[in-house]
Image: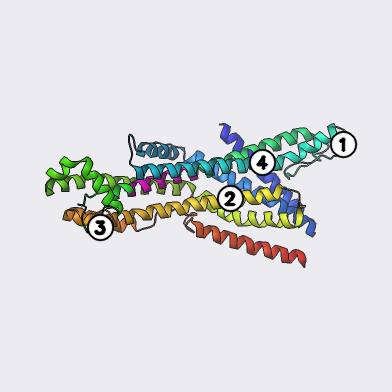
Amino acid sequence: MFYWFEFSNLFIVTWLELANIVQAAKGGTFQDAVEIFRMMPCVGYLLLAMSKSYMIEVHRPVYENLVSELRDMWPRGEVSDAEHQVIGTALRQLNYVTKGYYWCNNALLVVFLCPPFVDLAKMWMGYDGKYILPFFYWFPFDPFEHGYTVILAAQTWHGLITIWFMLSGDLLFCIFLSHITTQFDLLSVRIQRLVYVDVDKQLVDTYPLGEYCKNYANNHKHIVDSFSDNEWSVLHKQELNKIILRHHALIRLAGDVEHMFSFALLVNFFNSSIIICFCGFCCVIVEKWNELVYKSFLTTALSQTWLLCWYGQRLLESSARVSDALYECGWYKAAQNIKSSVLIMLHRSQKDIHVTTYGFSVISLSSYTTIIKTSWSYFTLLLNIYKN
């Protein structure tokens, strides 16, 4: 109930900002156009926040299932050095990302909300100041004459919930993809150890497979010495079945993330080019060199878009490493039925696993390059119009 109340609150706010844009457009002057440019990033941010939070609320059971399944996939007990390195690296990266992105958005919020309160403090202390509002709403009355403090408090709350909605969507996307990519990397480590191969002149113990097989022979000497080809085949088949089930589950979970976030990501990437363009224009033309509002907005927009694209790239790369692991797993020493199953899985793993913007484009670092190029084109076009 609380969510839908706040969602409807932001929905009304979006229409108030759009009404103000329409009102400014009626002026027809370039100064009115500049005012529109200043309002566009805020409108875009509101639309992104609503679209992402809406998908979270609508798909709540799928989110809960994702959390439950990914939790159950984490290894329990002692892990190998290679698995420890994969888990440690992923968790450190995720820790840096979540904290960095959280504080980046909160810094943006502080920069936007501080000026009105700073001016109020100046006036209370007897210095010159003026009433200002952090956001551009349309009102049928003069907000500086009637209910200024109430409107300022409401806009402050709107800024808070917009940031919270945005953070919830972006960080959940990054956390889910981080865990899925980590599981793909752990699966690759597990696949590389599928088949035991004797260490000899062909497979030296300095190779990753040779090092693992040497340690395996030392720790499981009774198995290496006593197992027949039939018993090895049964052991390999059992492990391969578990690997295939885990691979299918990860593909399905990546598909769930795609289903939940793809529309919001389409809105995000469509808006990002416009937001970055208008923020850049405001930084260069509108703001003074010592003002930080749109500079902070530009930094946040760039980092947010890069973050989504980077995790999309990680999903592509980690899923592709499964095919490399299958090729390096010592399959040539396995039974024929194991070789056939590995070959089938190898073909499947060579198909990209990715998240898209509602089917239009794959989210990766190349998408980030495209967004930056598009934003730069819009930005230079605006600058040329301004100069002429």
Say if 139 sits above or below 314 in the image: above
Q: Is 344 contained in the magenta span?
A: no
Q: Which residue is mark 3?
A: 343
Say if 236 sits above or below 74 in the image: below
Q: Amino acid at mark 4?
A: Leu
Q: Between residues 330 and 212, which one lies in front from this camera angle? A: 212
- Count neighbours of disc 2 (C-alpha within 10 A) and say few if under 14, some if 14 to 19, many if 20 or more: some
| Residue in view at x 77 percent, y 66 percent | 387
Residue 302, position in %: x, y? 60, 52
**Between marks 2 and 3, how big is the CA–CA gap?**
40 Å
Q: Between residues 148 and 173, which one lies in front from this camera angle? A: 173
Residue 60, position in %: x, y? 46, 38
Q: Nearer the viewer, mark 1 or mark 4?
A: 1
Q: Between residues 27 and 196, which one lies in front from this camera angle? A: 196
User: From this viewpoint, is residue 54 visible?
Assistant: no
Q: Quadrant of residue 114?
A: top right
